[in-house]
Amino acid sequence: MKTMTPLDELRHSAAHILATAVLRLFPDAKIDIGPPTESGFYYDFDLDHPFTAEDLEKIEAEMRRVVKENQRFERLDTTRAKAEQLFREKDQPYKLIRLNDIPEGEPVSLYRNGEFVDLCAGTHVPYTSKVKAFKLLSIAGAYHKGDEKNKQLQRIYGTAFPTKAELTEHLERLEEAKKRDHRRLGRDLKLFHMDETVGQGLVLWTPRGAIIRQELQNFISEELRKQGYQQVFTPHIGKLDLFRTSGHFPYYKDSQFYPIVERQTLDSLADEGCSCSELSNQLDAGEIEGFLLKPMNCPMHVKIFASQPHSYRDLPVRFAEFGTVYRWEQSGELNGMTRVRGFTQDDAHIFCTEDQLASEISGCLELVKIVFRMLGMSDYRVRIGLRDSDSSKYTGDSALWDKAESALREMARSLDVPYSEEPGEAAFYGPKIDFVVRDVIGREWQLGTVQVDYNLPERFDLSYIGSDNEEHRPVMIHRAPFGSFERFTGLLIEHFAGNFPFWLAPEQVRILTITDEQECYARELEGALKALQVRCSVDHHSDKLGAKIRRAEIEKIPAMLVVGKREAEEDRVSLRCRIDKSLDGTYSRNEAFALLQEQILERRLPAR
């Protein structure tokens, strides 16, 4: 069991105080669990009455009364039978389920504060009065045990801190996060659309959002060409046997879409009276063939490598693909663009010799750093995901794992940034380095990843001819600096609060006329800018100039060119630049165009 930090104890205690208050106000509530989280705590309730914002205010007030009562948190070690009797008497069925989840022979403990008793391993603060700075934040649905086949409960989220000052600072960050929410900004700025009739977790990129995606793709493609990558394309589906060989099926079975079976096969099985469960068992056993919406690109890249012989002189071979993959995420875990069911990775796989491994990893890490520098993401740390020696989920020879982990440790040290090692976080086929970025309001996001893999080359029997004319096994590196365009774009929307750098902005320049008389001149400017490949438009509305400026600001246009009678007569413009206010002023047409092109080509970051 993970040892709780003092902050964890505080938040865990706040969750018990929350449950105490809810049961006082709603005695019929059935309680499930209430753990601390990275940013606060929650507790899950089964109650016919749907909680409202007004209920949260009442519950929070009752929590303050519990705090004021200075109730002691008391640990009660007990037997399984006594705990079962207690929760039967209290009519708390979810606690009985959780009790049954505790393995036989392990201790059973309860925690009591006042009249409230919970099944809990602890630990807690000594008294409820120690929980002084807390706030209930929201209500959400949550399936019991995270399984959508189970009943959906009501989850109340809250947070707690040692001091009121820390709580206030956190709440201010949350308010800022709401303003930056990519789901709201994405809708307001017309960047993407999610439609239930298309499917949950499937992103529709609008023309404006597609520009951001294309610019990101162009940027990373430039760097890939410099590093000698070769572009490949692979289909969206593949035979199940391919993914059986790689290990993705059935290892990732629960996070994959159901296999596709040929209609002729289905008709034949139906005639034989085959049930759905029997069909599933036959698919798992490999007794019938099917196809899978690909959850990963790597098996297909392996097959491209294997399609022709290779000499040691050919290596490293670097394949890159902007490949779309599909994962069956639980509906409750979907979140705008950051957690979806279909996404496109800036994926690549390198096949190299062991002697080349260090330099190739270094190249991958440098590519991630180039991305971060370009987007102003300077505050990041590195996380090394290692295998858990006690887990059976990892495949392959232990000695090869040791080599891969050693190589990643060595490269992590060379980055000169903070790094941590996390056993149990490796991919099933190999260890990995993840880059965890802190954004402008202090939130952490896992972005680029680099993985070393000795196992897939073994599973697919890959080889190259070495200098000794013998066959040798290559090493494989998986890497994706962005991760996926969907998630990365969602994070960028929030990181920049929609104020994209000039080169990424869907619309870079808005031309504003003071009166309708300047319409022709504005259209002439628009045509000239478009010839220079600047994304621009003319605000042709008959509103006053102030309204046009305000509209461009709301739509977060990086630059405005204001033209009136004098500007039209003298072939000049008045420039208003969000990226660099020092550029504001009146210029000749050519001077203004040159400044705008410089901003775009230099890919400058917006002012903060």
Image: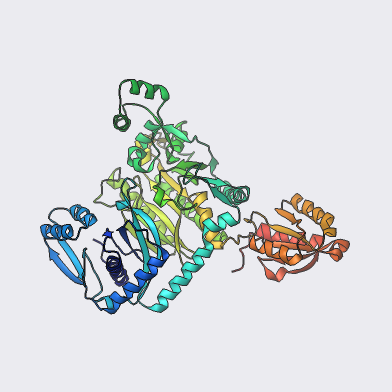
Total numbered labels placed on residues in the image = 0
Left or right: 458 as drawn, with respect to 223: left
Residue at 20% of width from left, 58% of height from top? 91
Q: From where the camera sits, is residue 440 visible?
A: no
Q: Nearer the viewer, residue 540 or 214?
A: 540
Image colouring: rainbow
Residue at 25% of width from left, 65% of height from top? 3
Q: From where the camera sits, is residue 349 visible?
A: yes
> Is the residue 534 above or below the residue 125 in the image?
above
> Is the residue 429 above or below the residue 103 in the image?
above
The percent position of residue 446, horizontal first and vertical second, equals 44, 57
The quarter of the picture where residue 254 lies is top left
Farthest residue, direction right: 569
Q: Nearer the viewer, residue 442 or 300?
A: 442
The quarter of the picture where residue 455 lies is top left
> Is the residue 471 above or below the residue 49 in the image?
above
Q: Nearer the viewer, residue 378 or 402?
A: 378
Residue at 66% of width from left, 60% of height from top? 557
The percent position of residue 200, horizontal first and vertical second, equals 46, 45
Q: Nearer the viewer, residue 45 or 281?
A: 45
Quadrant of the image for the N terminus? bottom left
Left or right: 530 as drawn, with respect to 467: right
The percent position of residue 124, horizontal first and vertical second, equals 25, 71
The percent position of residue 372, horizontal first and vertical second, equals 52, 59
Quadrant of the image for the C terminus? bottom right
The quarter of the picture where residue 471 lies is top left
